[in-house]
Image: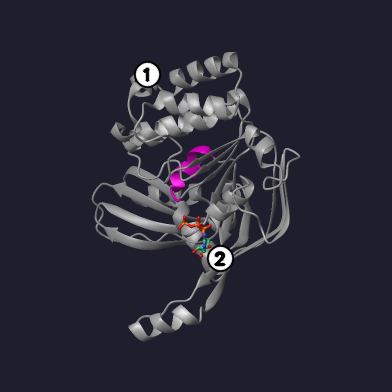
Amino acid sequence: MIALQGIHKSFKVAKRSGGLGQAVKSFFVREHTIVEALHDISFTVNEGEIVGYIGPNGAGKSTTIKVMSGILVPDRGACSIMGFTPWKERKAYVQHIGVVFGQRSQLWWDVPVIDSYELLRDIYRIPPADYQSNLSLLTETLELGDLLQTPVRQLSLGQRMRCEIAASLLHGPKVLFLDEPTIGLDAVSKIAVRQFIKTINKEKGVTVILTTHDMSDIEALADRILMIGKGTLLYDGSLGELRRRFGTQRTITADFREHAAPVDIPGAARLSWSPERAVYSVDTEQVLIASVISSLAEQVDLVDVAVETKPVEELIVQLYKEHQI
Ligand SMILES: Nc1ncnc2c1ncn2[C@@H]1O[C@H](COP(=O)(O)OP(=O)(O)OP(=O)(O)O)[C@@H](O)[C@H]1O
């Protein structure tokens, strides 16, 4: 459904140094630097996938979304989405995609939300019956109700985001690009937005590409991660694979009835010890978790045991280190 091949995109940025002298000089001689935002980006996405596009600030995530939604023209490379080249056949193409930029609004600020929706209906030439059925489904699932009659500037961030997502789906697109859809939202709104993304993906088969800094979005939603750093694709695979690749390390926290002497477990490194709690680090490629717990149980009177994997954030930092980002 989506195929990018060797996409390159650079920006020419005016160089400015401090001081009045430099400012006067730059008035006559403009110096520029070239920022390579995307370097040879290639990937494919199948129909019905939810793909998380992640990376540090300035990695090139938004630039990729802009190329895929036809807003930016790349310097080189090919991009085919549902048979369209986004920047060439923009008018026909936008009928098939929905785009949400979390930091920008596509809604008219001073008028009720419904007025913006009606404008979008006319822009996209959505047949009245389709518009009505899409609107009622979106109103119900995103709980828009009274919000439709409210001017956008009076909405909370979470309410606005629900309205933005509905706006991007009124014309029934097959692909949805979401750039930071949960930015700034509280926990409840985040869960609502995630739940909705899951629903439209499952029930309507909408393919979703989402950029986010929030790893819990990825854990909750994405079958697959594409990771980008300094304009280069660093990883393409599942979160599970990423965990397996780096995450054979587990931390075992054991609570037990008072036990004075620290206990050594073969194959496990003891990270801390107190008379009622010990923390061990275990490499699951070297030793089984079960054998660590059973040798611990032989020596202390166990009350509780917790086994934790490394948080995803740590795995990602490790990947950046590996690629020297
Ligand atoms: N219009 C522009 N003009 C000049 N440079 C730009 C422009 N847009 C992006 N860049 C540069 O391209 C690089 C990639 O930016 P991009 O916005 O795609 O990153 P991002 O991964 O979305 O970052 P963030 O997580 O901070 O939003 C950055 O170095 C950025 O400064």
**Vertical side of 132 occupied by 174: above or below:** below
Does 159 sit left or right of 217 as displayed?
left
Disc 1 residue: CB within 8 Å of ligand 1: no
- Provide the secondary structure element on which disc 2 rests: loop
**Residue 89 relative to residue 245: left or right:** right
Q: Is residue 17 above or below residue 206?
A: below
SS assignment for the magenta stretch, majority: helix
Q: Tell which of 196 and 128 is nearer to you.
A: 128
Under circle 1, the secondary element is helix
Provide residue 181's location: percent of width, then percent of height.
45, 41
- Confirm whether the magenta stretch covers residue 220: yes
User: In the rendering, which numbered label is found on residue 145?
Assistant: 1
Of the numbered discs in the image, which one, if any, rests on residue 230? 2
The stretch of residues the image draws in magenta is 213-221
What residue is shown at x 44% (from left), y 84% (from top)?
25
Give the CA separation, mark 1 to mark 2.
42 Å
The location of residue 199, given as percent across then percent down, is 53, 26
The N terminus is located in which quarter?
A: top right
